[in-house]
């Protein structure tokens, strides 16, 4: 039996695409599972002029594909209300405050308020300031702020935003969303690592040769050039998603599986991440831009709509991370992400060292590899050494594998559902804290500074490949190679 969660959630950007596609269906799933029952309320707000009935129809449309019982859906929708609101106008917060207090009274919710900011990042600080100054925070229970990415565009802008938010909220009230942390197979990293002594004992420099994180996309920039040409793969995928996955892989073993101890363990790793100078950026990182491919549909990046003809933007990044920790001394963490690659896949590959025993055979034992496939379909693969079937004693690699079943996938919470639920429970395990965000920005800023000054080569790669040759050479310099070939 699940326990009822009593809470009131206000969605800023309540008529937006994210709210309709992800947020309302996620809240509906929590309702169907019994986490939300009688004592909850949802207040939507945006600039769009809607009355309650029009807003409820918007919600009804957004959950129709998840509705099995129309009566149940209507009971759920009754907990929704809406107020048009200008987030930059202090006076308009009185209208929103009235709607929140009406909903709290109607559904008997004493405190426990969550404010979800699905709006442009430039409004985050403004909203937080007015929530406090205009009296929208509850005097009892909790107040929590959920923040969509990006959290700043550099360390300086992130620090400025953090200061603005901390004028109204303590850091433990801030829930910075990176939906990759809500993915089932990302959360499986902890289960595999800490739940199996065979891996727990071997998760260090004595047994692991290298760690690889790949986030590859087959699509090009599409219609996002306005944003993407200012961000590139480095800011769009490395600074946030990739670094948060690396946090689970590099972290120390936590004292307990609580959000406080998990964050402390991650921070011990993040604080030991080496920040590169210009020479090291050129040694340990590769930037590239996609060119043409075999298909006529594969335009070079510079010929994509709205891309400047002289753009030096990176559509591919590969690099080596180093952690100054006894656990990881001499172990490279390789990361790569790019567009127009050979296959869409998000995965982690843990490459173990070869054994020292010599069989005296023509084919000696190879590196064992543990692979965690995060997307597009979850799987765990383990490549091990075994004897070949020949007369001579040679070794070969065999594959052990498990794939998420369709039934499991059907029962798996979507990332946004999980993250809204965790915020309601006050569990920050799967959210980025300020220390982790700040270190990620400092690390990426050092690389960005070199690229902005155009002091690093800009490679090109064939669309439909797995990136430039320089990416392979980066690993080859250490005697390594990418596990995933596309």
Image (cartoon, rainbow, N blue to C red):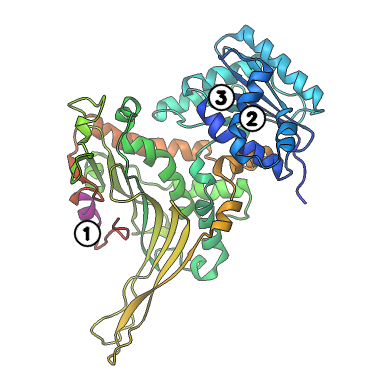
Frontmost of labels 1 and 3 is: 1
- Distance in Å between CA atoms under marks 3 and 2: 33 Å
Q: Which of 453 and 1 is in front in this view?
A: 1
Location of residue 480 by image quarter: bottom left
Range of the magenta residues? 470-476
Q: Which of 392 and 17 is in front in this view?
A: 17
Q: In this view, does 95 lie above or below 253?
A: above
* Between discs 2 and 1, the one toward the N terminus: 2
Q: Residues within 10 Å of mark 3 (few under 14, many from 20)?
A: many
Q: In which quarter of the image is the C terminus?
A: bottom left
Task: Identify residue for label 1.
Answer: 476
The percent position of residue 250, horizontal first and vertical second, equals 45, 54
The percent position of residue 168, horizontal first and vertical second, equals 62, 22
Asked whether residue 147 is in view, the answer is: no
Task: Identify residue for label 3.
Answer: 165
- Distance in Å between CA atoms under marks 1 and 3: 45 Å
**Main SS, magenta residues:** helix
Residue 164 in the figure: left or right of residue 57: left
* Between discs 3 and 2, the one toward the N terminus: 2
Task: Identify residue for label 2.
Answer: 60
Location of residue 54 by image quarter: top right
Q: In this view, does 332 lie above or below 339?
A: below
Report the residue at 36% width, 49% height from top: 344
Location of residue 49 by image quarter: top right
């Amino acid at each position: 039996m699940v326990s009822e969660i009593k809470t009131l959630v206000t969605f800023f950007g309540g008529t937006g695409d994210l709210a309709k596609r992800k947020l309302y269906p996620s809240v509906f799933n929590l309702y169907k599972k019994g986490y939300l029952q009688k004592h909850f309320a949802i207040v939507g707000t945006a600039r769009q002029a809607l009355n309650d009935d029009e807003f409820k129809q918007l919600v009804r449309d957004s959950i129709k594909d998840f509705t099995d019982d129309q009566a149940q859906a209507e009971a759920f929708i009754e907990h929704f209300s809406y107020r048009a609101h200008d987030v930059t106008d202090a006076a308009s917060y009185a209208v929103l405050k009235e709607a929140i207090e009406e909903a709290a009274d109607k559904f008997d919710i004493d405190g426990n308020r969550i404010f979800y900011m699905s709006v442009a990042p430039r409004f985050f600080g403004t909203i937080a300031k007015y929530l406090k100054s205009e009296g929208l925070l509850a005097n009892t229970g909790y107040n929590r702020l959920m923040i969509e990415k990006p959290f700043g565009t550099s360390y300086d802008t992130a620090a400025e935003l953090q200061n603005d938010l901390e004028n109204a909220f303590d850091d433990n009230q801030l829930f910075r969303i990176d939906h990759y942390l809500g993915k089932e197979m990302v959360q499986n990293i902890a289960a595999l690592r800490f739940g199996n002594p065979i891996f727990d004992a071997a998760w260090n420099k004595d047994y692991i040769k290298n760690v690889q994180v790949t986030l590859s996309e087959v699509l090009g920039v599409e219609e996002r050039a306005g944003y993407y040409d200012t961000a590139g793969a480095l800011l769009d995928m490395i600074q946030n998603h990739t670094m948060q996955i690396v946090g689970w892989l590099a972290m120390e073993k936590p004292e307990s599986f609580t959000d406080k101890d998990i964050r402390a363990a991650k921070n011990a790793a993040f604080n030991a991440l080496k920040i590169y100078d210009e020479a090291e950026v050129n040694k340990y990182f590769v930037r590239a831009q996609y060119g043409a491919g075999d298909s006529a549909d594969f335009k070079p990046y510079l010929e994509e709509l709205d891309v400047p003809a002289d753009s030096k933007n990176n559509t591919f990044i590969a690099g080596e991370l180093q952690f100054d920790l006894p656990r990881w001394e001499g172990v490279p963490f390789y990361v790569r992400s790019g567009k127009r690659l050979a296959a869409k896949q998000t995965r982690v590959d843990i490459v173990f060292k070869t054994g020292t025993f010599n069989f005296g055979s023509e084919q000696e034992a190879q590196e064992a590899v543990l692979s965690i496939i995060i997307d597009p379909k979850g799987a765990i693969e383990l490549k091990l050494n075994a004897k070949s079937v020949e007369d001579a004693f040679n070794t070969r690699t065999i594959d052990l594998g498990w794939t998420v079943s369709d039934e499991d996938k059907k029962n798996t919470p979507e990332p946004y559902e999980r993250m809204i639920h965790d915020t309601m429970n006050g569990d920050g395990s799967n959210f980025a804290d300020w220390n982790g965000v700040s270190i990620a920005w400092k690390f990426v800023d050092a690389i960005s500074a070199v690229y902005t000054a155009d002091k690093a080569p800009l490679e090109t790669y064939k669309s439909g490949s797995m990136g430039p040759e320089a990416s392979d050479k980066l690993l080859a310099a250490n005697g390594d190679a990418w596990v995933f070939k596309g």
